[in-house]
Amino acid sequence: MKKYILFFTLIFQFVCANESLDANFKKANDLYNKEDYQNALQTFESIEKQGNISADLYFNIGNCYYKLGKVAPSIYNYEKALLLNPDDEGIQTNLSFAQKMAIDDIKILPEVGFKKMVKEFTSKLHYDTWAWIAVCIAFLSLLSFLGYYFGNTVFLKRTFFSLFLLFLIGIGTTVFSAFLQKKFDTNYNPAIVFAEATTLKSEPKNSSEDVATLHEGTKVFVLETLGNWSQVELTDKTKAWINKEAIKEVKK
């Protein structure tokens, strides 16, 4: 009996929590529509502090910061939303508007050659999806092997053996794709400059040579961290060191 009471209590708490979340989201949207962006922002961020994470939530937080004219926080939250929903055109559009408020205009050098082709291919699916496809193909390869083993004619044996070899290639391709996509995802560590202005250094120390000056809202990619310094790469492939307090990593 106690188990049933506990179960229904948990269900009731879950329903109440969802209703409270929906109510807060509606309240925040109403405040935003009334152009009360500061209070809308506070309400949206209170939802986030409760442990709720979604592309819509970060998108709305980014909209509030954008309306308040805060460059870095708006870009940061749009980037977080884009991580969760990379194909959303609304997020992409608003992010491009926010980026126009940033001072720095750094050239974007695209990936080229074989590496670009591999990235484009593996990025079509999440690495977990690649892994599940590999499992399914492995099962099919087992069936084809059994078909070859128990086949009672030369034609059946050749057919199933050919399928077996084809599935082996498929397993190799999907496992390799899963591995590469996982690696790309792990190494992809974007960050946004939050300092009003900060100087990039050639080495992780203040006395080293200045490389460039960045301003708030600029996107960088963190390569490694050493003490109070982070090595970053810009979109033009420039690599330098920056005080890690001047940036905020999007994945954190």
Image (cartoon, helix red, strand yellow):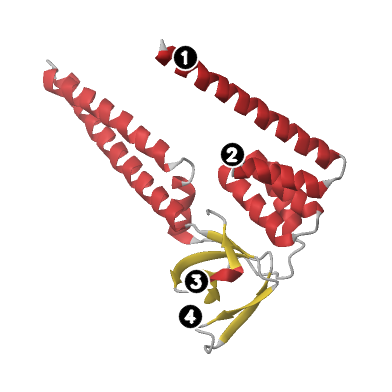
Neighbourhood count class around disc 3 (C-alpha, 10 Å): few under 14, some 14–19, many 20 upward: many
Q: Position of residue 214 (x, y in %)?
A: 65, 74
Q: Which residue is mark 4?
A: 204
Q: Is residue 68 above or below residue 21?
A: below
Please name the amino acid that badge 1 sits on.
Ile
Mark closest to the chain's N terminus, 3 or 2: 2
Q: What is the spatial separation of the Cα atoms under label 3 and label 2, in whole angstroms?
A: 29 Å
- Residue 45 lies, in percent from the top left, at 67, 46
* In this rendering, the label closer to the viewer, 1 or 2: 1
The residue that appears at 85% across and 45% down in the rendered structure is 36
- Residue 138 in view here: yes
Image coordinates for residue 231, horizontal then vertical, percent:
49, 72
Task: Give the residue pinned by disc 2.
Answer: 52
Task: Check if mark 1's residue and mark 4's residue have beta carbons within 8 Å.
Answer: no
Crowdedness of circle 2 by 10 Å Cα count: few (<14), some, many (20+)? few
The residue pinned by badge 1 equals: 5
Q: Residue visible at 44% across and 58% down?
A: 187
Q: Secondary structure under badge 2?
A: loop
Front position in the image: 97 or 172: 97
- Marking on residue 230: 3
Residue at x-position 76% and y-position 59%: 70
User: Is 227 situated above or below 68?
Assistant: below
Residue 163 in which image quadrant = top left
Cβ atoms under marks 3 and 2 closer than 8 Å: no
Q: Earlier in the sequence, mark 1 or mark 4?
A: 1
> Secondary structure under badge 4?
loop
**Residue drawn at 76 percent across, 61 percent down:** 100
Q: Is residue 225 above or below residue 188?
A: below
Check disc 3 and give the amino acid type.
Ser
Q: CA distance from mark 1 to mark 2?
A: 27 Å
